[in-house]
Image (spheres, rainbow, N blue to C red):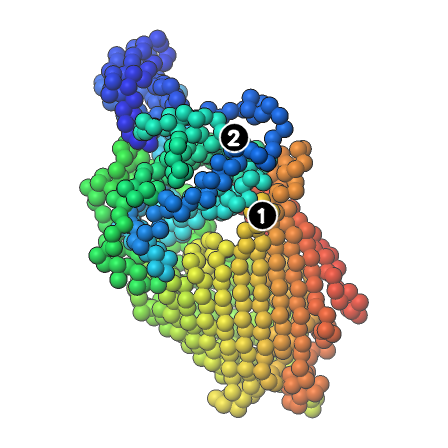
Amino acid sequence: MRDSLSTAGLPYASITAEPGNASTVADNRGLFEMNLPAGARTITARYQGYAPRTVPVKHSAINLYDIYLTPQAEELKEVVIKRKRYSKRNNPAVDFARRIRNARELTDPRRNDFYSYDRYERTTLALNDFDTTASNALLKSMPFLIEHVDTSLISGQPVLNLSLKEKASTEYWQKDGERSSSVVRGTRNSGIDEFVNQNNVTAVLDNFFREIDLYEGNIKMLNNSFVSPLSPVAPDFYRFYLTDSAAVVPGSDKPHIALAFYPQNKSYFGFSGHIYVERDDTTMFITRVEMKAPKEMNLNFIKDLSIVQTFDRAPDGSRLKTADDLMMVLYAVNGLPDFYVTHRITNRNHSFARPADADSIFSTPQEKLVRPDAAERDSVFWTAEAARPLPKGENKTHELMKRLRGKPLVYWGEKVLHALTENYIPIGRNSKFDPGPISSLASYNSLEGLRLRAGGMTTANLSRHWFGRGYVAHGFKDHRWKYGAEVEYSFTPKEYHSREFPMHSLRLTHSYDIDRLGSRYLHTSSDNAVLSLQRMSDAHFSYLRQTVLRYTLELRCNFSIVAEAAQRQQNESRYLRFELPDGTFLPHYNMTEFGITLSYAPGARYLQGRNERSFVDTEVPVFTLSHRYAPKGVLGSRYGLNRTELSVSKQFDLYIAGRLYLDVNAAHVWGSSPFTELLIPNANLSYTIQRGAFALMNPMEFINTSYVSLHATWQLRGALLNLIPVVRRAGLREVVSFSGLWGHRSHRADPTFANMLPALPADVNVTRMSGRPYMEVSAGLDNILKLFRVDYVWRLSYLDVPYPIDRHGIRIALHVTF
């Protein structure tokens, strides 16, 4: 019998077999032995101050158990503590919390010139409350599952392990420049999610389970921000109580003061729990932290969440975090089995000495270095790294998956899920060519009508350096074939496809397809089937034939350079023609362009797709600067182009008021260019919410040579609705958005004043901006059924134009988050 955190034996713990009345008591080392009666299914261990734990009896001659009990702190009900109206003024508990926060620097290990330690992370996913009785139909068909059952540290119920991820690293800190670095020495993954891109899984887990530092104002976790009990705003968010002045902390023989904290509104994103500080310690050294998520919190898919942190004191008084354990019970749909998730961190070998290879560690711009042999570590390495005894079932997930894949349902289920998540269909085990994308097989637009598309891409199984992609598409209304083909050489070998981060490649592309002027979607493919349903008809597209040579260099510090040379030919369509001032029509025109794009997103993590990436954490700033240049009359350019664009995006946490997303864009065209090359804002014609597009603007309604735009979204996360007792049960969250654009079109690029520029299409309603901005505002509800966000959008300006517009409307998005 052991403490689950310190692994120390628990003397004189009681053990009972059920059903039956057999029982025993452990000795002074926590060891026990008992004869099990016939028919016994489980044994339950109990110890004062710890949560009881029940484990299944294995049907073998000898049962060997290593039972870990979790310390359990009893939460005091407010009715017991509260004898009068709570007040933070003249409250010794609030003053005690302030003293802990103000003493941060006294025990901060990063006040030293150098700080390093070895870190072991273990993340597991298991089926919660797994039925281990003989009546379980699943066990009857697959009796080997019982070998993979362990016990929940939260409830003591049996759990069936399904996935295991381990990482061993050494963390480094240098005070000069406040630089941190992580050297990953080992990684190991096994379980039911093996078919998913493991780099994406790692990025999501790193974002969900971040380092928890109570001294930070916000605790980032599960893609949400929780107010820390030691935040500067904590006295306005929490109620604090001093509950014990002689509390016993496992592993310590010194009395502690227990500081209890509870959110004033349990629906807000905060915690309830205890902070333990050694009594009479003027440095306010934190020894242990226990936190839980209140049941009433507006947090999706979480039934139970528990966090335990433990600290040791270094000789110089620094607090050394030794363990950081997170355990939670997840549910997807009520009525289906729950999942048990643990993320357990063990830190050891703390040092304040200068690392021998400090120059190489801190000279690289990237914050994480992965050793080449990290994924090839053997079991001896992992046994040494684990530091704490590990449940037996967790270590057998790889063996479990081998057995499960022998079942046709599991085997083909993995294939289908892999195709849906990747949007491509692999052919064979070591596929050399993957058809796709699936989402673009069929779509509809006003110019082409029904559009069918077939294509695919080669993989690293064919070549790790040379890659190819291609597609053909046909529109049944314009009766034209479209196509695209590319060949790419990657200077660095790839694991599976050419777009993997970081890229260093040379790519040649040739394509012929429609060009959706005024409605180019930024974050998805324009022929995605979801965008086929549109609020208004628009067929003013051109046909674009282009050949592009592109060089891409991405650094691991998330700085990238893209340089390209392109030959583009804009061709008229039956709805969009290029009429010259002399009344003649121009079937097409050519432009030879040169461009460069610089991008920087410090600290960004990505979800890697086959065609594009998305940010896992949107709070990182993203800066993008680009310039396109086409000299008139050179290399076939009929017109000239000189265009500069700048964009900045950032998320801001507002504590209990939620978070604010900002996208700011600005651009300028220097000189005279045809209207197809000017600054045309993106009009969202679909009924879906599209970031960076205007929901009620007509396509090509505003054409400018200079513009500044702002897109702002404020997610309140239930800050107001949580105050309404009946409404907050629905878990709804408020969203407010604003989109604005100010622009100007100079005479140099106006066909009315500039000679030989194509005239604006007569049947396209183009409005010259008159010094006032175009504006939209929306208000909506997020987290509807935990799946949807619905906004109602209003157009605020340019309402008196002499052509049809959408003044308001409903927009919807699939939005799943914790």
Residue occupied by mark 2: 241
x and y percent of residue 757 in the render?
Answer: 64, 86
Q: Quadrant of the image for the N terminus?
A: top left
Circles 1 and 2, Cβ within 8 Å, touching? The answer is no
Kind of residue at badge 2: Tyr
- Please determine whether, in this image, residue 786 is positioned above or below residue 372: above
Left or right: where 159 falls relative to 685: left
Tell me which residue sits at (72%, 73%) in the image: 771
x and y percent of residue 485 in the render?
Answer: 43, 71
Tell me which residue sits at (28%, 27%) in the image: 8
Tell me which residue sits at (64%, 55%) in the image: 737
Closer to the chain start, of discs 1 and 2, is 2
x and y percent of residue 572 in the render?
Answer: 61, 78
Q: Residue 717, located in which quarter of the rendered image?
A: top right
Identify which residue, 734 or 510, lies in the foreground: 734
Q: Residues within 10 Å of mark 1 (few under 14, many from 20)?
A: many
Residue occupied by mark 1: 658
Left or right: where 622 falls relative to 164: right
x and y percent of residue 118 in the render?
Answer: 28, 46
Element at label 2? strand
Distance Cα–Cα, label 1 vs label 2: 26 Å
Identify which residue, 375 or 219, lies in the foreground: 219
Kind of residue at badge 1: Gly
